Amino acid sequence: MALGRSDSREKRISRFIRRHFGVRPRSLELYKESLRHSSSADCQRDGLPSNERLEFLGDSVLDMIVVDMLFRKFPNGDEGEMTRMKARLVSREALNFLGEEIGVEHLLDAQTGKGAVHASLRGNAMEALVGAVYLDRGFRRTQRGVLKLLQRFDLDTRIQATVDFKSKLHEWGQKRKRKVQFNVVREFKRGGQQLYQMQVLVGGKVMGTSDGPSKKSAEQAAAREACRHIFGDDKGSS
């Protein structure tokens, strides 16, 4: 009976990895470890390793994937802005959200009592899963899987849209009677992804240019650049 439950769990984990990371697991033990919290009976009773080491590895792999993506996606982006974007994309909040969206808690091996799974356990498991995929299938396959996940849940746009820079810029222009205008510079593809380059003019002067996967996200990025020029920061406060 116990063997049947074990087989069923392994099949569920295998399907989960194929569905969300797009790879066929070779070493299921790695993925079982990535989903094993230190509170689990297997850790407490049998001394099996928890997911903490894989979490440590996955954190660095995830950083590299996101840094590479931002570097290629925003060829005109400066170091400070890309650092802030990376921090938001790999933040605990973002990873907790991603873990909840794909239902990682249903496979977690953790003793949580009668309460709900704490959000941080989902985020930790997401990092550990990235570490497991990396060890099992290598960097390139891990990279493709993670980027598809980010794109699937539109996470980069959600994280970037914490401040409506376009509205802030229009409000500032109206107060000072300066016309704010957005223009599409070009539409192009990079790595198979459709991108738009937008330009924002304030009083006829170009104040920001940026790329994005949609006109809306490119406008926000260009407006953010203009706000940085005008206000000296990313808050858009006068």
Image (cartoon, grey):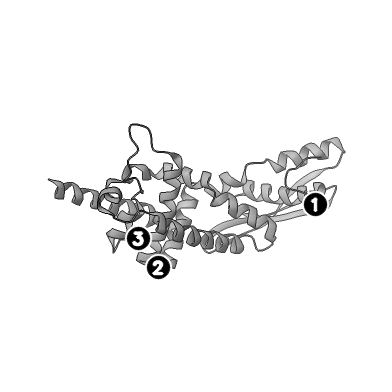
Q: Secondary structure at mark 1?
A: helix
Crowd band around label 1 with a 10 angstrom C-alpha radius: few (<14), some (14–19), many (20+): some
Work out how far the residue at label 2 is from the one at label 1, CA to CA, in angstroms. Answer: 41 Å
Of the numbered discs 3 and 2, the one sitting upstream in the chain is 3
- Disc assigned to residue 229: 1
Q: Quadrant of the N terminus?
A: top left
Q: Amino acid at mark 1?
A: His
Q: Is residue 1 left or right of residue 166?
A: left
Q: Earlier in the sequence, mark 3 or mark 1?
A: 3
What is the C-alpha distance between the residues marked 3 and 1? Answer: 44 Å
User: Label 2 belongs to which residue?
Assistant: 138
User: Residue flagged by tag 2: what amino acid is it?
Assistant: Gly
Reading the image, the residue beneath label 3 is 23
Residue 29 vs residue 169, the one in the foreground = 29
**Discs 2/1, front:** 2
Residue at 42% of width from left, 44% of height from top? 121
Compared to 162, does 27 lie above or below?
A: below
Instruction: Specify few, some or many for label 2: CA neighbours under 10 Å numbering under 14, 14-19, or 20 or more.
Output: few
Residue 222 vertical position relative to residue 61 in the rendered view, above or below: above
